[in-house]
Image (cartoon, rainbow, N blue to C red):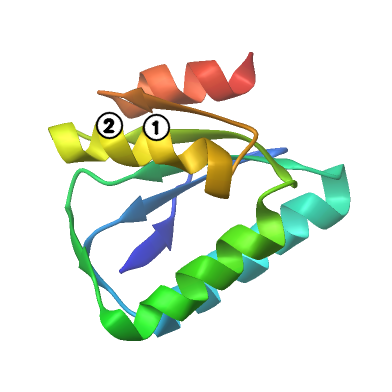
């Protein structure tokens, strides 16, 4: 499941990604990011993966399409988590999803970085 975080404001938008992500979950993510990009020209994106389990195979195409569509429009991407593999996701995000990406242990740290 992907749900928008209440702290989202301006060009910085955040989402909690939990459980198993399906293709339908991108129908939540994509319009919100599109709206921010349309209004500000680019977005800063926070993805909290702390409760994330897996992305279903049906969602892989939507994931790749999202990266292709927004790669040059997402300035900063903050990945929040508590597992080693989540840090690797942050390292891989720059070439595929954002101009710059970083890993954080807490949402507060991530929001601070996005606001710089």
**Callout 2 secondary element:** helix
Q: Which residue is mark 2?
A: 87
Residue drawn 50% across the image and 76% down it: 62
Residue 102, position as x, y percentages in the image: 44, 25
Residue 77 visible in the shown view:
yes
Screen quadrant of the C terminus: top right
The disc label shown at residue 46, or none: none
Q: Give the alpha-carbon distance from disc 1 to disc 2, as whole Å.
A: 6 Å
Q: Which residue occupies the foreground of this view, 53 or 87? A: 87
Residue drawn 42% across the image and 40% down it: 92
Q: Which residue occupies the foreground of this view, 53 or 9? A: 53
* 26 lies above or below 79: below
Residue drawn 75% across the image and 60% down it: 35
Q: Which residue occupies the foreground of this view, 7 or 20? A: 20
Question: In the shown orientation, is residue 51 left or right of residue 37?
Answer: left
Residue 60, position as x, y percentages in the image: 39, 75
Q: Which residue is mark 1?
A: 91
Residue drawn 74% across the image and 47% down it: 73
**Callout 1 secondary element:** helix
* 14 lies above or below 61: above
For mark 1, does the 10 Å Cα neighbourhood hold few (<14), some (14 to 19), or many (20 or more) residues?
A: some
Residue 97 visible in the shown view:
no
Contact between marks 1 and 2 (CB within 8 A): the answer is yes
Screen quadrant of the N terminus: bottom left
């Amino acid at each position: 499941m992907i749900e928008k975080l209440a702290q989202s404001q301006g060009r910085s938008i955040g989402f909690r990604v939990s459980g198993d992500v399906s293709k339908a979950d991108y129908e939540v993510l994509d319009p919100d990011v599109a709206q921010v990009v349309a209004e500000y020209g680019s977005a800063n994106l926070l993805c909290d993966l702390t409760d994330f389990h897996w992305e279903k195979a049906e969602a892989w195409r939507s994931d790749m399409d999202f990266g292709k569509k927004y790669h040059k429009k997402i300035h900063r991407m903050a990945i929040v988590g508590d597992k080693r593999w989540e840090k690797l996701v942050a390292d891989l995000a720059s070439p595929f999803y954002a101009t710059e990406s970083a890993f954080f242990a807490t949402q507060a740290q991530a929001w601070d970085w996005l606001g710089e």
